């Protein structure tokens, strides 16, 4: 039985080497830009310190990948209404869209991220928490998946005016086929030591926790571990993934060093004063106070030994071009090592590419995004399963769990609404997306809102009775005194009235055949084509039965309507040569 630990990796259940977590801590330091001050020699040759300047490219790279993979346009759904409503409530309560994107960025930087659904006893709801890789300890050696792990939670208390550190180890294991959660609490006076094992009741925060709980009727652990796509080549076989910056640590530090040197050179690119040591000797006034002629902490003044007093000045040149070219060169190596295409971070001096251009024009970034979208998608589907299993356990959801899950990432490549609109418009034009779906994706409409908006658009486009619109189109093709031969016969007038009655309705209504106004209305070109068919039949140039088939095939009319439109054309009514003239 374990009684004390120096490090968490000393626990016999944990098979991970400490070197893995040393690597993760280094990644975290680089991501947070936690660098010590820089030492330098001042005018007196004494050691002084200044702030280290860093670009923090590690955060920029991690943020870029996280934004390409996931943003607030991503949707998680199930194909059952009751279940989907419950899922959306859980996600909204946990502010998932906001929090997951931020946590994913940090996870990509340091080596991974664990998502942990939990039951909040205060609100009696399922919520989602996150655990970074430096607090996550797999218990298995399987590098493909993590089903057993220890999760460390560190806290501190003040006891007798002294800070005491507590570490809770929460072991998630499958024992004899049953999911078992075991809690162990450790106490230490030092932040660098885990300490000795103490009862859970030692602090109020964990007083209600049980040492061991067996959970039945679950198929997977109450966590989902998410890592970067690609093999861990730093610690081969480790179930923990790499950080996106792991293979570029040296280059990222080189960028920071070059930037720091550049900023210091800019700061120091001012007049230098070189003087003999006579000027640096300390003199005293009549009251015995030392007289200081130069600021000793500045590096502007330089002292030289000389027999005779002298003082001179010079202004160093600024090497901005060399520094910028060096940083750009290193950035190109970072792009290659992190799976991004050339031009993603570096600048060629001509143009800056948008996120969509980077993804669409360069296969490297596209492949990197695709690989990670696949992994995140599977992880989110596992998260959905875990949420419903936990909800069923606490009787928060009693409906069916026989549903399919869906995660949609297609908004991840867009950097602006205009690019997204262009993409959706092209999809509608090509016939591979409906207008309704495009409006839902573009504007976030619900299905009903999109349908209502389409009806309003149709009403604006067809803001008058369809028959009147058709009649207006016909009239516009003729002079005021011209008429269509035979158009004023009693038979044809009756037929037109019959057709008009069929289509005389408002937007959204249907006729006796169940057709809408959009299905039976014609534009000017269609009206002219229909008139040509009737005239050709009347002139004997087109067989009557063939005309009926053409009308049914080319226009939104059935056979009965086609016969009514033809009327007497081809059945006694003909257009004579002199009538055509």
Image (cartoon, rainbow, N blue to C red):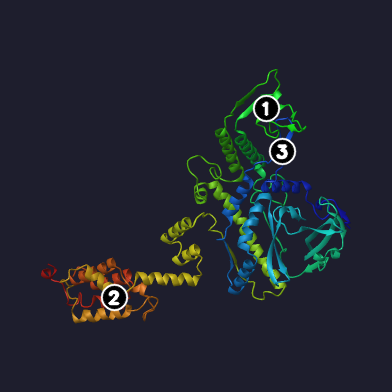
CB-based contact (under 8 Å), mark 3 and mark 1: no
Asked if disc 1 and disc 2 are in contact, CB closer than 8 Å, the reply is: no
Choose top left, top right, bottom left or bottom right for residue 568: bottom left
Residue 323 pos. (x, y %): 58, 35
Q: Which secondary structure, mark 2? A: helix
Q: Which residue is identified by label 1?
A: 302
User: Which of the 4 image quadrants contains residue 540?
Assistant: bottom left
Q: Is residue 70 left or right of residue 20?
A: left
Q: Which residue sits furthest front?
A: 286
Q: Nearer the viewer, residue 80 or 258?
A: 258
- First-in-chain label (3 vs 1): 3
Quadrant of residue 430 within the rendered picture = bottom left
* Residue to which mark 3 is pinned: 49
Residue 184 point in image, percent of width and height: 83, 61
Q: Are marks 3 and 2 in contact (CB under 8 Å)?
A: no
Q: Which mark is residue 467?
A: 2
Q: Position of residue 390 (x, y in %)?
A: 70, 69
- The residue located at (72%, 48%) in the rendering is 24
Q: Quadrant of the C terminus?
A: bottom left
Residue 30, percent from left and from top: 68, 45
The local crowd at label 3, few if under 14, some if 14 to 19, many if 20 or more residues have their Cα within 10 Å, is few
Label 2 packing within 10 angstroms: few (<14), some (14-19), many (20+): many
Callout in the foreground (3, 1): 1
Q: Of circles 1 and 2, which is in front?
A: 1
Label 3 and label 1: CA atoms lie apart by 18 Å
The numbered mark, 3 or 2, whose residue comes first in the sequence reads 3
Split into 4 quadrants, where in the image is the N terminus? Answer: bottom right
Q: Secondary structure at mark 1?
A: strand
Q: Residues within 10 Å of mark 1 (few under 14, many from 20)?
A: many
Q: CA distance from mark 3 to mark 2?
A: 86 Å
Could you tell me if residue 545 is visible in this image? no
Residue at the limit of the structure toward the left, as seen here:
578
């Amino acid at each position: 039985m374990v009684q004390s630990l120096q490090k968490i990796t000393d626990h016999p259940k944990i098979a991970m080497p400490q070197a893995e977590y040393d690597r993760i801590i280094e990644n975290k330091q680089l991501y947070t830009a936690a660098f010590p001050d820089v030492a330098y020699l001042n005018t007196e040759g004494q050691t002084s310190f200044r702030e280290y300047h860093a670009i923090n490219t590690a955060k920029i790279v991690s943020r870029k990948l996280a934004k390409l993979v996931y943003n607030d346009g991503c949707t998680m759904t199930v194909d059952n209404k009751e279940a989907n409503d419950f899922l959306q409530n859980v996600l909204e309560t946990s502010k998932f869209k906001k929090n997951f994107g931020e946590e994913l960025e940090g996870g990509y930087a340091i080596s991974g991220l664990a998502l942990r659904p939990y039951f909040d006893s205060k609100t009696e709801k399922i919520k989602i928490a996150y655990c970074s890789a430096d607090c996550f300890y797999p218990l298995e050696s399987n590098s493909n998946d993590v089903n057993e792990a220890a999760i460390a939670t560190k806290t501190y208390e003040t006891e007798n005016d002294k800070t005491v550190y507590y570490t809770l180890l929460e072991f998630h294991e499958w024992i004899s086929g049953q999911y078992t959660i075991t809690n162990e609490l450790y106490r230490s006076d030092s932040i660098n030591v885990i300490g000795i094992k103490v009862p859970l009741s030692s602090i109020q925060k964990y007083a209600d926790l049980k040492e061991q709980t067996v959970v039945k009727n679950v198929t997977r652990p109450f966590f989902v571990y998410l890592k970067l796509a690609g093999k861990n080549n730093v610690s081969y076989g480790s179930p923990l993934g790499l950080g996106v910056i792991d293979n570029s640590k040296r280059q990222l530090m080189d960028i920071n060093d070059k930037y720091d040197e550049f900023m210091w050179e800019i700061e120091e690119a001012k007049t230098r004063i070189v003087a003999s040591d006579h000027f640096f000797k300390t003199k005293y006034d009549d009251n015995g106070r030392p007289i200081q002629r130069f600021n000793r902490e500045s590096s502007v003044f330089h002292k030289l030994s000389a027999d005779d007093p002298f003082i001179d000045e010079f202004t160093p040149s600024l090497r901005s071009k060399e520094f910028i070219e060096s940083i750009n060169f290193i950035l190109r190596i970072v792009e290659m090592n992190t799976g991004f295409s050339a031009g993603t971070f570096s600048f060629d001096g001509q143009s800056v590419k948008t996120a969509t251009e980077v993804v669409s024009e360069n296969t490297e970034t596209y492949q990197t995004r695709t690989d990670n979208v696949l992994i995140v998608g599977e992880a989110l589907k596992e998260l959905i399963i875990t949420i419903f299993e936990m909800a069923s356990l606490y009787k928060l959801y009693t409906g069916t769990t026989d549903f399919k899950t869906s995660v949609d990432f297609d908004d991840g490549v867009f950097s602006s609404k205009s690019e997204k609109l262009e993409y959706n418009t092209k999809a509608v034009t090509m016939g591979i997306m409906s207008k309704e779906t495009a409006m839902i994706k573009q504007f976030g409409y619900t299905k009903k809102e999109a349908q209502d908006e389409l009806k309003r658009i149709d009403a604006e486009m067809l803001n008058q009775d369809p028959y009147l619109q058709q009649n207006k189109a016909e009239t516009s093709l003729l002079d005021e005194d011209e008429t269509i031969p035979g158009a004023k016969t009693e038979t044809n007038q009756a037929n037109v009235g019959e057709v008009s009655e069929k289509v005389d309705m408002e937007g959204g209504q249907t006729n006796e055949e169940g057709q809408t106004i959009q299905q039976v209305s014609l534009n000017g070109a269609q009206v002219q084509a229909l008139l040509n068919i009737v005239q050709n039949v009347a002139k004997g140039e087109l067989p009557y039965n063939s005309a009926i088939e053409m009308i049914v095939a080319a226009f939104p009319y059935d056979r009965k309507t086609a016969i009514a439109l033809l009327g007497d054309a081809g059945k006694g009514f003909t257009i004579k040569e002199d009538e055509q003239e």
